[in-house]
Image (tube, rainbow, N blue to C red):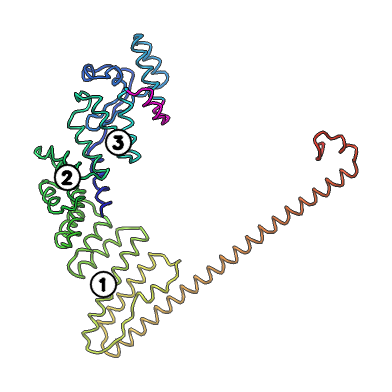
Amino acid sequence: MKKFGIFVLICFLTCMTTTKAVVVTPQSIKTTKQTTYMPYSQYLKYYVIDEERIKLIFKRLSQEEDKDYQSGLSKEEKQNYKYVKKVQELIDRGAWGEALYKYAEFYPAWVQYYSRCLEIKNYPEAIRTLERLRSMDNHYAIFSEDIINNEFGRVLYLNGDYPQALQYFKMYENTGKPSIYSYIAHCYFKMDEYGEAIGYIRKIPNPSYEDNELLYTIYMQKNNKVQAHNIAKALLNQRYNYNNLMKLQATAQNDSDRLKYAYQARNSTMNENEISQANAIIANIEQRNLDRQVSGHGQFIRIPVWNDFLVKLPDNVSSAEICSKQDEFFKTAKEYIKRYQGQQLSNAFLSLNQDFNNYVQEKQNQYYIQKQEELQQALIEKQERDNYIMQQMIEQQRLQRMERLYFLSHPYENMYNPYGSGYWW
């Protein structure tokens, strides 16, 4: 469940921080008012700066655009531009050690290195890089102090330092931002302080899907299925899918609701494993319903069990066919219970049992025939391969005999052959 928490926060933060799209042209590479008073401004103008994250992207030009752009630069500007391109070439081919060693004070390189550390999930190195970025721009002229602190909280969380991450997020608690409440809640969850986590999520006016997923997980951890069921309903309203229907099934308070959600879940997916999982739940509930209904007849009646047939079915029976036969089995059994009583019901169940035994036998026979055919085909293919290899060996032996005969009939040619053995032609 702890892995789930990390996954949820990563997804949430990613959704909250989308880089703005920028169209790069030669005209866009100029010193703006924003960068004029920044450190490294002579270099930063060649990059797109993400104002919400510690991220920047090099402004790439085509060969023709690059040539046109440089024609309008002064001598000093050309030197700066070539310097940036030289560093960027090292970065583009992943030569981080060389780039950061030779150009240790080049701020854009460290920003890109930080992004790379996040990409490869090297969070300890990302933290060290973030500390260096803050020292290189200690007046927060490029990225604001709030952005830096938020990034520290995010990376510390990803690194598993939840108490330290919490300290950074708590600095902005009074802003009332829903995202801050969410960050704090996730930290408390990872620290197993479920009450605090619930309290902060409840402060969010309109909880996101990720916030509700966290709430659901907490309530399931606390074995509070009533509250978990309510949250599962909210999740289903946000995203109608198999997983959320199964959450409702798992937290429903009666078999009728559980069965309803299990059928809906099965119908919402094409995944074989998910269908099998839903079918297993459906079969167990339907079988219990049969037991309850038959017990009211007041005498012992042997009830056919679907799982007894299921386990005998071969692997080549599709999930769609299994769904169909399972539904047919329980529908027929319920009709018999409504229609018959006593011995008549026993006889009806014997008939149902025989019908499905015949079905299983038929599928097993088909499977056996299929396997026999596959085995026969494999033997034919093996024989063809063996024959081919044998023909190749025979041909090789024939060529070797011809070669020996030639050498015997041309001894002097072989003697003066500067390349040893082999044909001259």
Secondary structure state at the residue bearing disc 2: helix
Whether residue 319 sits left or right of residue 39 in the image: it is right
Please identify, in this view, whether the residue under mark 3 or under mark 1 is nearer the observer.
3
Q: Which quadrant is the N terminus positioned in? A: bottom left
Pointer 1 with pointer 2, Cβ within 8 A: no
Which percent across, then down, holds residue 416?
Answer: 87, 34
Residue located 30% across and 89% down the image: 344
Q: CA distance from mark 2 to mark 3?
A: 23 Å
Q: Which residue is mark 2?
A: 182
Callout 3 amino acid? Ala
Identify which residue is drawn at 28% across, 72% down.
284
Compared with residue 226, is residue 301 higher up or lower down, i.e. above or below?
below
Closer to viewer: mark 1 or mark 2: 2
Can you say whether 115 is above or below 362 in the image?
above
Q: Nearer the viewer, residue 183 or 124?
A: 124
> Which numbered disc covers residue 126?
3
209 displayed left or right of 313: left
Q: Position of residue 59 (x, y in %)?
A: 34, 24
Please provide the residue range marked out in magenta: 90-104
Location of residue 76 (image quadrant):
top left
- Numbered circle sitting on residue 285: 1
* Image coords of residue 107 (percent x, y): 30, 24
Q: Residues within 10 Å of mark 1 (few under 14, many from 20)?
A: some
Q: Is residue 99 magenta?
A: yes
Q: Residues within 10 Å of mark 3 (few under 14, many from 20)?
A: many
Horizontally, is 226 left or right of 26 in the view? left
